Image (spheres, rainbow, N blue to C red):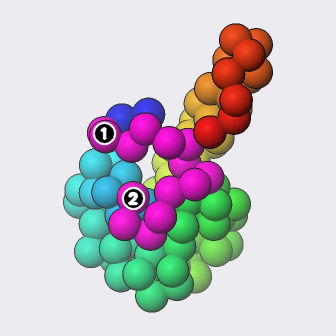
Amino acid sequence: MAMGLSKGPSSWSVEEVLEWIQEQYPTKMTLLHKAVIKHDITGRVLLRLKDYQLKLLGVEDEKQQQEILQDLLLLKVQEEISELSDICSGEPAK
């Protein structure tokens, strides 16, 4: 995970989602920023987005949708690996 976001993406606030979007997609920031605020998209919601929902949020281009979905899949996998690592090391879940 990039930035100063130490907790898993599924527990991100709307502000933390905006921070991630700004870092990942600086050129699409305005469109996504408005959608995240308008629809109160937290990390849990972000990780569940599908292509048709991205289209409803204003991401019309299929290539951009796929790019975002791939990045979201990567976030999910990183979070799963972190959780498994914590389980294996005996640390309590975050």
Q: CA distance from mark 1 to mark 2?
A: 10 Å
Q: Residue 70: horizontal and vertical position, in percent? A: 57, 43
Q: Which residue is mark 1?
A: 3
Crowd rating for badge 1 (residues with CA inside 10 Å; few <14, some 14–19, many 20+): few
Q: Residue furthest top?
A: 89
Q: Quadrant of the C terminus?
A: top right
Residue 51 x/y as whole percent: 65, 64
At x 43%, y 60%, the residue is: 17
Q: Is residue 81 above or below residue 79?
A: above
Q: Which mark is residue 46?
A: none
The residue tagged 2 is 16
| Residue 19 image point, x, y percent | 32, 57
Query: In which image quadrant can residue 81 be found?
Result: top right
Q: Secondary structure at mark 1?
A: loop
* Label pair 1/2, CB-CB below 8 angstroms: no
Specify whether residue 49 is painted magenta.
no
